[in-house]
Amino acid sequence: MRLFYYPPGQDTVVTFPIAIGKRGWRTPKGQTSVIGKRRNPTWTPPASIRREAAKRGKKLKKVYRASPSNPLGTRALRLGLPGYLIHGTNKPYSIGKRISHGCIRLRRSDIEHLFDLVAVDTPVTIVSQASRLPYSPTESPENYEPAPIVAKKHHKPRRKPKQRKTTPTRKVRRRPVDEPTPIVSANNEFNMRQLQQEIDSGAVTPINLSDL
């Protein structure tokens, strides 16, 4: 689970690990934008979150002022989706988990860095896909223009159920392993088989294809 920021006019990407909504409080997918920025935000827990906390035997404050215990951390980016933010956290160990009430959390140093980079009206895309690439293998990279902020909710592929063996096992002669094929050839053309293997690996860390 990561957030990718594409600075306008630059051939680069800035990426951060994130935490997203837990079961029953899913982070919504779709297109939106940053409509506001707030340093040292206050947090007023909505009634739905207060009720959910009460069921767990926890009583929330009516208002959380700017402090180390504020769940929003030191910075908040308000999204066009009502009630949803990209913000910091007072629980850095939660990053990388499905644990929030739908907002996107970042570590303090990361949200402060992103806060300084992002302007109001910056487009935001929230997607759920295992690919580390910002485009589908069927799309042309040079024709794809991602939104400046892309939040990816990584999902694990479903495992196929194990099947009972109906025939006796037998030794299979292994075929020799082919030599690794460069993902980019000398004339800068993509090797789609190698590219697909990278996509299927499920990792979310950006890679420089020319270095493979």
Image (cartoon, grey):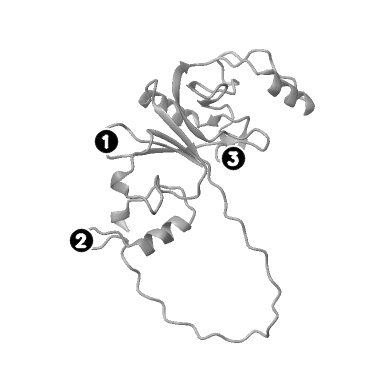
Seen in the picture, residue 144 relative to 84 is either above or below; the reply is: below
Indicate the position of residue 43 as horizontal and vertical percent values: 59, 16
Q: Closer to us: mark 1 or mark 3? A: 1
Q: Quadrant of the C terminus?
A: bottom left
Q: Closer to us: mark 2 or mark 1? A: 2
Seen in the picture, residue 10 relative to 78 is either above or below; the reply is: below
Please name the amino acid that badge 2 sits on: Asn
Q: Earlier in the sequence, mark 2 or mark 1?
A: 1
Cα–Cα span, label 1 and label 3 = 30 Å
Cα–Cα span, label 2 and label 1 = 24 Å
**Residue at left 27%, top 35%?**
10
Q: Which residue is mark 1?
A: 10
**Residue at left 35%, top 35%?**
6
Q: Residue furthest left?
A: 187
Q: Is residue 174 left or right of residue 44?
A: left
Q: Is residue 56 left or right of residue 20?
A: right
Q: Closer to us: mark 3 or mark 2? A: 2
Please name the amino acid that badge 1 sits on: Gln
Q: Which residue is mark 3?
A: 97
Between 174 and 75, which is closer to the camera in this rendering? 174
* SS type, badge 1: loop
* SS type, badge 2: loop
* SS type, badge 3: loop
Q: Earlier in the sequence, mark 3 or mark 2?
A: 3
Give residue 59's mark: none
Please name the amino acid that badge 3 sits on: Lys
Indicate the position of residue 190 as horizontal and vertical percent values: 30, 59
Q: Which residue is mark 2?
A: 187
